[in-house]
Image (cartoon, rainbow, N blue to C red):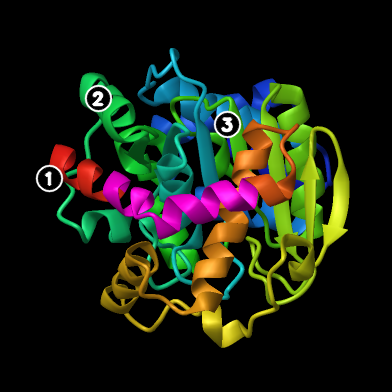
Amino acid sequence: MNMKEILTRLSAHEILSREEAREVMLAVTREEYNDVQITAFFTALLMRGIQVEELLGLRDGLLETGLPVDLSPYKVIDIVGTGGDNKNTFNISTCASLVVAGAGYKVAKHGNYAATSVSGASQVIEGHGVKFTNDNSRLRRSLEDCNFVYLHAPLFAHGMKSVAPVRKAMQIPTCFNLLGPLVNPCRPAFQLLGVATMNQMRLYSSVYERLGVAYGIVNSLDGYDEVSLTGNFKIKTNRRERIMQPADLGLPTVRPEDVYGGETPQEALRIFDQVLRGEATDSRKNVVLANAALAIQVMKPDKELTDCMALARESLESGKALMCLKKYIDLNS
C-alpha cells in the first residue's frame, strides 16, 4: 500500500480496515517502507489511538509472516504485560509463569528483550545460560517435561526485526508494544495480560472477544501493567469486571520501591532468582503470587481466588516453581 495515502488517511482520523492494516504489516516485513515512513506511521497511530480493526490487522500480518509453533495438544496460558508503564518493576510475569507451571499448568511464555525497562523476560531467561530456540520438537519437550516453554519473540515474529531500529530510536511505546502480547506464535488458549491504562483494557478486551481467547486483563489503578499490590487494581475477564484491593487476596499493600526491578540486568536477575528460591521479601513474593493466582483463575474460572492463591503459594514455597526453572535450563542450555 502507498504510505502517502495511508498517512493522509490517518491524519484525517480515518480508520484502516483489518485487511488494510494487514497489508501495511506485510509491506513493512518486505521492507517496502523506509524508517522515516515507518516512524510517521507509528506516530500517526499513536496520536490518534489505534483501533480494534487496525490492531487485529497488524497482528494478522505479523503472524502470517512469522514462524508458527504447534503446541496444539496442550491448552497453554501466556502471562505477559504490554510494557511501557515506565515503572521498571522486576520480572513479575516471568516469575508468575514459573509459579503457574510449578502448580501443574502448561505455560508458553512469549517475550523479548526490554524496550522500556532495565530487563525484559528474554534477558532474565538468557541470563541463566538458556539458548533460545524455535525448534518445535524442543519447544514441545520443554512443555512436556517442565510445564514451561519460553518463546523468544524475534525468532518467530520476523516482522519485528524490520521495525526494531525505529522502535529503539523513538524511545517511547508504539503500537508494537500493543502487538507483542497478541502475536504469541502458539496462539495460546488462555492469556493473563497486564495493561498500563484503562483505554488499553477496553481495546484488548474487544480484541480478545473477536479472537475467542479466554482472557484476564489486569491494571493497577496507579499505572502498573500488572497487579503490583501498590493499591487497588482492576481485572476484566470473559465473565466479569471488578475492582479489587490487595486485601481481597488476603495480602497487604506494598510500596512502589518493593517491586522496583533495580538499575541493571544483573540486579533484575538476582531479584528473579531470590523470589523463586524463597529468599525474596514478602512484598516481592506476594506480588508474584497475586499474578500467578489470577492466571490460574483465567484457566479455571470456577475455582475460588483463595484456592488459586493456595495453589500458587504451594508451588512457590514447596520449590516446585524453582524445579520447573532448573529443568527448563537443563533442557535448553
Q: Earlier in the sequence, mark 1 or mark 3?
A: 3
Q: Position of residue 3 (x, y in %)?
A: 59, 38
Measuring 57% from the left and 75% from the top, which residue is drawn there? 87
Q: Which residue is mark 2?
A: 141
Q: Quadrant of residue 219?
A: bottom right
Q: Which residue is mark 1?
A: 333
Which label lies toward us, 1 or 3? 1
Q: Amino acid at mark 3?
A: Arg
Measuring 44% from the left and 76% from the top, which residue is drawn there? 261
Q: Counting other residues with Cα less than 10 Å from the Cα at mark 3, is it few (<14), some (14-19), or many (20 or more)?
A: many
Q: Is residue 8 magenta?
A: no
Magenta stretch, main secondary structure class: helix
Instruction: Depth check: give the residue in front, 32 or 113.
Output: 113
Instruction: Depth check: give the residue in front, 31 or 196.
Output: 196
Q: Position of residue 287 (x, y in %)?
A: 57, 67
Q: Is residue 309 magenta?
A: yes
Q: Which residues are magenta?
A: 308-324
Measuring 41% from the left and 33% from the top, which residue is drawn there? 29
Q: Which residue is mark 3?
A: 59
Mark 2, secondary structure of its residue:
helix
Q: Earlier in the sequence, mark 2 or mark 3?
A: 3
Marker disc for residue 200: none
Q: Amino acid at mark 2?
A: Arg
Instruction: Depth check: give the residue in front, 300 or 10.
Output: 300
Judged left or right of residue 178, residue 49 is right
Give the alpha-carbon distance from disc 1 to disc 2, as whole Å: 14 Å
The answer to whether 313 is drawn above or below residue 305 in the figure is below
Residue 50 visible in rendering: no
Residue at the limit of the structure toward the top, as seen here: 73
